[in-house]
Amino acid sequence: GISMKKVLVLGGTRFFGRKLVELLLADGHDVTIVTRGKLANPFGDKVKHVIVNRRDTEAFSKAVEGEYYDIIYDNICYSPNEAKAFCDIFNGKMGKLVFTSTLSTYAADGNAKSEADFDPYTYSIQMGDTEDFTYGEGKRQAEAVFFKYATCPVVAVRFPIVMGIDDYTKRLHFHVKHVVNEEAIGFFYMDAEMSFILAEEAGQFLKWAGLTDVEGPFNATAQGTVSLKDLMALVEKATSKQAKIVLVENDEIRSPYAVPASWYMTTEKAEQAGFVFSKLNDWLPGLIGEIANQYN
């Protein structure tokens, strides 16, 4: 059996963070979640619940005083300032850090991305808050800060867009809903190939990244890609309606998946380390069908 770990999760109440906590609890680990208290704690007394705003470093530090965690998951860090404050609080109090990063650390330039395409160890650090950077740059900076300043092993998990029936961003839902309602959807380039991962698998990968001895940056995505053209064909099939697709710049109707070029990543590194990913085409049509049932 696996030895019980004491685990702290920042961002564990919804979507893939919630899946991660469910998996950790199922394996008998001792889990504490940190939230601002805005969303209900879905786990009741199965977890310890610390209510604090991470940006209030004094309160955050006080809330975890005297504690040591074998693994900490930070799913909600978006800036170098947050990453540095985190290291100041937790260095010496954590055995391992797993940071949720993103495909957005790579440029959408049409090429398959491997971990070496963004090297956080040599990246020039520029401090600042979330508001000071684009999403991708904030995550690049956060990775660079964690790898430089954390005194324990760090894994930066680079996810593409995460999909799921309970996705609160409703990005895949957007496409289904627009097709059902016969509303136009704007794209730039329909042949763009994209990577995706299911929330369940994202949770499984985070668990694996914490409990095994891997460290460094890791891409995590379902195997295979789908073009936006083929994705929309799946939506048409599931809804029995024709999509109204326009090539535009209009924000109102622009797809949240509208990318100028293919944007996907390779997973050789994780697969060589022993994680086996699902195949995108094994679950994407079914997920689109499930979402279509909500709107039909």
Image (cartoon, helix red, strand yellow):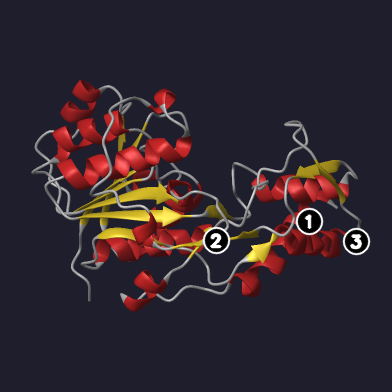
Residue linked to disc 3: 240
Assign a secondary structure to mark 2. strand
Q: Quadrant of residue 12?
A: top left
Assign a secondary structure to mark 1. helix
Residue 6's x, y, as percent? 20, 53
Give the mark nearer the N terminus: 2 vs 1.
2
Residue linked to disc 2: 198
Total marks in image = 3
Q: Is residue 108 above or below residue 134?
A: below
Amino acid at pointer 3:
Ser
Q: CA distance from mark 1 to mark 3?
A: 10 Å
Residue 131's x, y, as percent? 43, 23
Q: Residues within 10 Å of mark 1 (few under 14, many from 20)?
A: many
Give the mark nearer the N terminus: 1 vs 3.
3
Pointer 2 and pointer 3: residues touching (CB < 8 Å)?
A: no
Q: For residue 152, say whether it is visible.
A: yes
Q: Is residue 146 above or below residue 51?
A: below
Residue 191's x, y, as percent? 72, 60
Q: CA distance from mark 2 to mark 1?
A: 17 Å
Amino acid at pointer 1:
Ala
Does residue 243 appear to the left or right of 9 in the view shown?
Answer: right
Residue 172's x, y, as percent? 68, 51
Q: Nearer the viewer, residue 114 or 64?
A: 114
Q: Nearer the viewer, residue 142 or 48?
A: 142
Q: Nearer the viewer, residue 95 or 102?
A: 102
Residue linked to disc 1: 292
